[in-house]
Image (spheres, rainbow, N blue to C red):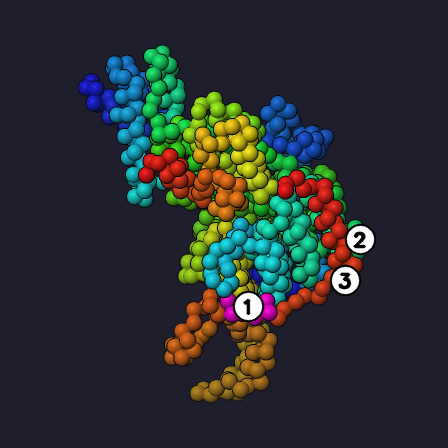
Amino acid sequence: MPGGVLRGKRLTFLSNDELQRIHETTVEVLENVGIKSFSDSITKVFADAGAEVDPKNKIVKIPENIVKEALKKAPKRFILCGRNPKNDIIIDNERIYFGMGGTPTPYIRDIETGEFRRPTRKDFADATRLGDALPNMSFLMTIAGAFDVPYELEYLYEYEILFNNTEKPIVYPAPGAEIAKYALKMASIVAGGEEELRKRPILSLYGEPPPPLMITETDENLIEYARLGIPIALGPTAMAGSTGPITLAGAAIISNAGSLTAISLVQLINPGSPILYACWVAATDPRTGRHAYGSPEFAFSTSVINSQMAHYYGLPCFGFAGCPDSNYPDAQAGAEAMMMTLMNTLSGVNLMHDCGYIAGGDAGSMEMAVICDEICGIALKIARGIDVNDETLAFDIIREVGPCGHFLSHKHTLKFLEKGEIYIPKLFKRLSKDEWIKTGKKKIHEVARETAKKILKEHFPEPLPKDVQQKLTSVLKQAEEKLRTSK
Amino acid sequence: MALNDVLNEVKEAVLSFDSEKTVEAVKKALKAGLNPIDIIEKGITPGLQIVGKKFEEGELFLMHLVAAGEAAKKAIDQVIQPELLKSGSERKTLGKVVIGTVAGDIHDIGKNIVAALLFAAGFEVYDLGKDVPTSEFVKKAKEVNADVVALSALLSTTLPVQKEVIDALKAAGIREKVKVIVGGAPATKEWAEKIGADGYAATATEAVTVVKKLLNFD
């Protein structure tokens, strides 16, 4: 379960007036510019609620009252469960948790060779088991895709592997209505029935309405999850300078519009259905055109803008840790991962994902996942702050030990050492240079690799009951018959 | 005004990334009696080449390339093309590229950047937009005698449509006549090889390099 709470004040750069302006400008965009809906069923939901629809251009103009009502109805607190209840987490706007991975990456950094290659079901299963073991990962996505399967079924194979290989809560995409329905069916089987799943949702959808100002048939998955009241995490990301204005405030409007559209849709379908807010702005790298994960702009927007707007709306939010642009677990990767993690943590972002990503999201890396787990531990320690009270001020102890004394063996020291007053890194080393040389001058990503390999060798979650495994496989077979068109 | 000055004004307009300025400068050049092909080759193209060089040197960025490309395209489409049609001539380009995002996919920012860079590099670009029906790629490729068909997809669910387009080109009997390149976040070199594409690129600038190589321009 870990995670924690941000003890101190959240990072707040924006005044309430500024947050209000962002909100009001977004509402103006939704009312006057509108969003383009490529989905008839989504358009219908808005039309039935009183939105103005231009069917020729597929533009839906969402009036303020729909947004207002939706923000009132969206719950401020809900649970996301693991197969094992000890892993359940409460999602509100105070608690903070980290997650491994994100949406499936096209490549994985091979754990033996460090080369980039196409990942398979085995890699996906290994990634899941790794995340299941890492102590600071409270929920799982992925750092590999499963590409040795028919493409129409990729996500369903991945769900099967997720359910079998982790007891932690799952946050994962399920693009389109069909895949969403099958994913929910599989989840219901694992949970012990649809009613059980509603009470204890062991998964959350992750969706990305595309900027600027679009919603597509892929997003019909929102309808399926909302119907059952299963949590949804959003990731609308305008890229400043390409799919949004280059000014971060302007790009935030585009992303916020995406979130408010999705939140409105969900509340119209099933008022009170849980959904995490997000407002992310990526820099469009001016040299490559790529989405710059490790940019200060992305760090700032996913932390400060995201969290401040989420608090303005009173909703929990989804953000980031990890995710370097660097193609190697090097100094750049470490710097980018730490920047992202600390900024998000100190902004009190509630669920932070992408730990273990590398190469700007093109690849996942087991070493990076282990490194990020450490970084997250460090961030949580800082977030805890300190207690200032009689016991911690330790006046009596100071008087007892007196000038020139030492505190090493005092009961007080031992007590608070055991309580975690000093963070003890699991991965990062603080060797003297001589020790470092003597022990082989290891680079930290090499040590991370050894840790990952050990975990993969030793850690296996509680297997699903045989009959559940079989039921999942048969749903997969059903899906294959229905959806597979390729050879 | 000396003809060189007029051509220089065209070049400077491109370098200012301003569409309106470029259109005006080109109109002025035509009025001054310059040949439309000369206006392109001695005014617009040098401007684009300078932008390209400065981009490579890190002085200018993608946004500049796209803006310069759009300024040049507007002037060529609005002012030069009608003139060329009148005289029945055609501008020289490095080749013809039909580009689009495949059916079912509405993501196009990467594709737009590639289209702009290809244009700025001297190719004739036919941008079919996004969510393009497979048959449209084939139709356009035939219609303009394309040298390259460039396909973009951003979703793992639409990526396979790239193979469908290749199959459609085969069925129409023109697969051998075009080079096919593919791109987009879920696309990989292995995927391109698997579906029998001729090239793959991970970024817009790499795409231009690949196209040039495929058409033997390096």
* Residue B218: quarter of image: top left
- Identified by mark 3, the residue type is Pro
What is the magenta range?
A449-457
Provide the residue designation for mark 3.
A465
Q: Chain of mark 3?
A: A
Provide the residue designation for mark 2.
A193
Q: Nearer the viewer, mark 3 or mark 2?
A: 3
Q: Chain of mark 2?
A: A
Looking at marks 1 and 2 on the same chain, the residue that comes earlier in the sequence is marked by 2
Residue at x 51%, y 70% (from the top left corner): A450
Co-location on one chain, circles 1 and 3:
yes
Secondary element at image label 2: loop
Above/below status of B21 relative to A355 = above
Provide the residue designation for mark 1.
A453
Label 1, label 3: how far apart the Cα atoms are: 27 Å
Residue A123 visible to an observer of this rendering: yes
